[in-house]
Image: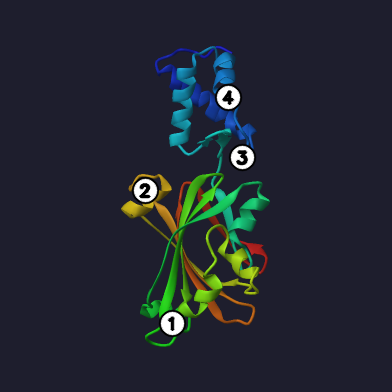
Amino acid sequence: MNLSRQDEPLYQTLASTIRAELSMYKPGDLLPGELRLAERFAVNRHTVRRALDLLVQEGNIIRIKGKGTKVLTRPLLYPVQAKTAYTDQFSAMGLTARAQLLKVYQRPANQDELTQLALAPGSTVLEYRTLRFIDDEPISVMTHFFSADYETLLRDYKRDSMRQYLKDRGCHLQRASSVIGARLPTIDEASRLLIPQSAPVLTVTTLSKNQHGHPVELTFSVSRADRFQYQVVLNGEHI
């Protein structure tokens, strides 16, 4: 296939052509390699690379080292309901979800944490900060807050699903409430999520209770707005 060489640069014409074809792919599908695209469109690989760079910047595709170029044709849809778990939800979509533990520390609880977690005045909390990835793309920075009483239970947590880690140890969590917001990222958040500080992020504050109805975990997540959408589900009904 020969591209029409009009007024715009050739790589932009190629990017427009590939962009129009993305609807034929499912999220997670791999695009043909650069060499195959160059042969198909009768251009050199440098032109293909510049076209793909443009689509990466737009959030349509992502390059994954050692795997290829994956299609990200629409934001990831995450249902906000009582029993949804981050890792399980995206694994069901055929995506690989993982979490990297960034830091852990203990400090005095603030008033909101005391109230939400039903702690006595003067209590301390454990703060676990994680970076969440979907198919090796950083998507969310998540901070988990627990009563210091859970220090022994949490001692061996190193990575991946916090909810599954707790479930494996007999603590079954269920979402009790979530508050969704939006703002611009901090310098640290933008750096970790690989986005400019001018790009908006979605924030979610969630309280989760155990099988006995006791508040156990308060989380605060900061997610890329270009890659995430939240779907609120009430009594099985989507809104």
Question: SS at mark 1?
Answer: helix
Q: Earlier in the sequence, mark 1 or mark 3?
A: 3
Asked if the residue at tag 2 contacts the one at tag 1, i.e. Cβ–Cβ closer than 8 Å, the answer is no
Question: SS at mark 4?
Answer: loop
- Residue corresponding to mark 4: 33
User: Looking at the image, is 51 positioned above or below residue 90?
Assistant: above
User: Looking at the image, is 165 positioned above or below residue 99?
Assistant: below
- Residue corresponding to mark 2: 191
User: Looking at the image, is 102 positioned above or below residue 116?
Assistant: above
- Residue corresponding to mark 1: 115
Question: SS at mark 3?
Answer: loop
Tell which tag, 1 or 4, sits nearer the viewer.
Answer: 4
User: Looking at the image, is 89 positioned above or below residue 115?
Assistant: above
In percent of width and height, residue 33 lies at 58, 24
Q: Earlier in the sequence, mark 2 or mark 3?
A: 3
Query: Gap between marks 1 and 3, in whole Å?
Result: 41 Å
Residue type highlighted by circle 3: Gly
In percent of width and height, residue 1 lies at 59, 13
Q: Earlier in the sequence, mark 2 or mark 4?
A: 4
Tell which tag, 2 or 3, sits nearer the viewer.
Answer: 2
- Residue corresponding to mark 3: 28
Disc ID at residue 48: none
